[in-house]
Image: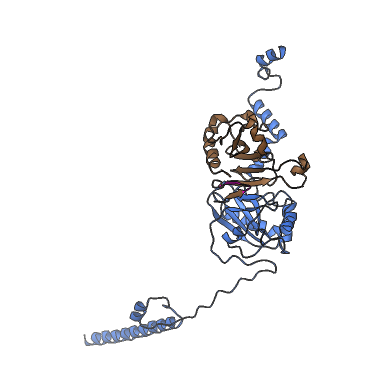
Chain colours: A blue, B brown
Amino acid sequence: MLTLVILEGIVLALLGVLVVGLLRSHAEILRRLHDLGAGVFDDEEDTAAQGVTSTVEMSERPSIRTREGVPEPRTSAVTEGHDVSGVTPSGNAKAIGVVGAEHSTLLAFLSSGCGTCGDFWRAFSVGEADSLPGRDTRLVVVTKGPDEESVSAVRELAAGATVTVMSSDAFEDYGVPVSPYFILVDGPSGSIVGEGAAGNWSQVANLLRQAAADAGLTTDGSSRHDAVARMRDGEVREARADADLMAAGILPGHPSLYPESSAEDESR
Amino acid sequence: MARLEAFDLAADPPKGWDGEIYRRDDDGIEGRAALFGSTEVATPILHLANFPLPASRGDYGGGAVELMGRGGIFVSLLEHPSHEGQTALFAANDVPWPLRASDFDPKQMQRAIGGQAGCQRFFTHNGRAFCLYVAIGSYGTRSVLVREVNAALASLELG
């Protein structure tokens, strides 16, 4: 009996040593964590209750570096689109419905002077941007207003089918720091679904496809307008009509193609 | 909302609409001088549309209405030289809107396009002579589209 009591006492003593060791280890871990800055954002009252506090100096986010000629991303947090109004290079008053439109709008913020913009003006003039990914995406080129841009230079560069609006307000509304810069706005939601800068049009096209895919829009550049144009194309329409008639059993020479009334009209 | 204002004409296009006010007074190949000679008075033209207006299009929407879907609306307000306002064609001396669904007819299209319908009215306002031309993408849904047409027309301000 005495032996058992002694053994039990020894076991309890060992367990006590083990518990003390664990507590010391835990305290050491907490101290190291505090040294590393844990709890730095806790309220003062809470930290006072917890005891040890320490501060950590947060370094500034490193600035984004871009290739030469490619502007940095916008710093403003504009996420909603805006309608664009201004003048055309010909001096006409122009308004572009961006928000609430059924289609998406790709706003290309360009200038007549920047070297990088040259590739975009060229690409637009030869129709490389005629088919864009997204919801019937239309391209609108925006330059700064006549008070900050060379109207004659823009008029020369904008010659072609691309809609061009000169509007310094648009640059301000969208927080565009410098050109070239591209912003894709989804019309129905009015939200900016993609934006970025690049050195040439092919890079922008890739960015657009990604943005459109992320937003759940079509990426093949197919357009309702293209489809409508195809539907109205004479040969396609004729072929479609022929196919529909044949499917209904109406072949060349079918009596229904020569109604009596027409015959009577002709006989008059 | 983007406001349009030029040549004593103004409009606040409805949400999502395009608009432009222009005058063919340049010397370009499509300019008035090239088309009619330099004696022709250049008058302003206002276009509104609930679909993207192409950069190049005719005064009555040629090149634009062909792109119009079934829900499309194209509005053209063309000012005529003021002396024409004395003719019988411009006898109506007030704006013709609001329009009615029955005002639209496929035969009033400048160029017939299957399914589409148009409406054309001549009038004077404050001594200025105007022609209003409206094309809609679907004659079948004219009673619905006419409400949208009238909302756009109500935003017009004729100096």
**Apparent side of residue B109 relative to residue A13 in the rendered image (left or right):** right
Magenta-drawn stretch contains B44: no
Above or below A189: residue A60: below
Instruction: Report if residue A248 is visible in the image.
Output: yes
Could you tell me which quadrant the N terminus of chain A lies in? bottom left
Above or below A251: residue B52: below
Instruction: Write down the quadrant of residue A196 in the picture.
Output: bottom right
**Apparent side of residue B89 relative to residue A30 in the rendered image (left or right):** right
Closer-to-camera residue (A148/A162): A148
Closer-to-camera residue (A165/B54): A165
Q: Position of residue A16 (x, y in %)?
A: 31, 85
Instruction: Write down the quadrant of residue A122 in the picture.
Output: bottom right
- Residue at x-position 26% and y-position 84%: A8
Magenta-drawn stretch contains B9: yes
Q: Position of residue B81 (x, y in %)?
A: 68, 39
Could you tell me which quadrant the C terminus of chain A lies in? top right
* Dominant secondary structure, magenta: strand
Question: Which residues are the magenta region?
Answer: B6-11
- Residue at x-position 53% and y-position 78%: A59
Q: Position of residue B1 (x, y in %)?
A: 54, 51
Closer-to-camera residue (A95/A186): A95
Q: How many marks?
A: 0
Closer-to-camera residue (A9/B116): B116
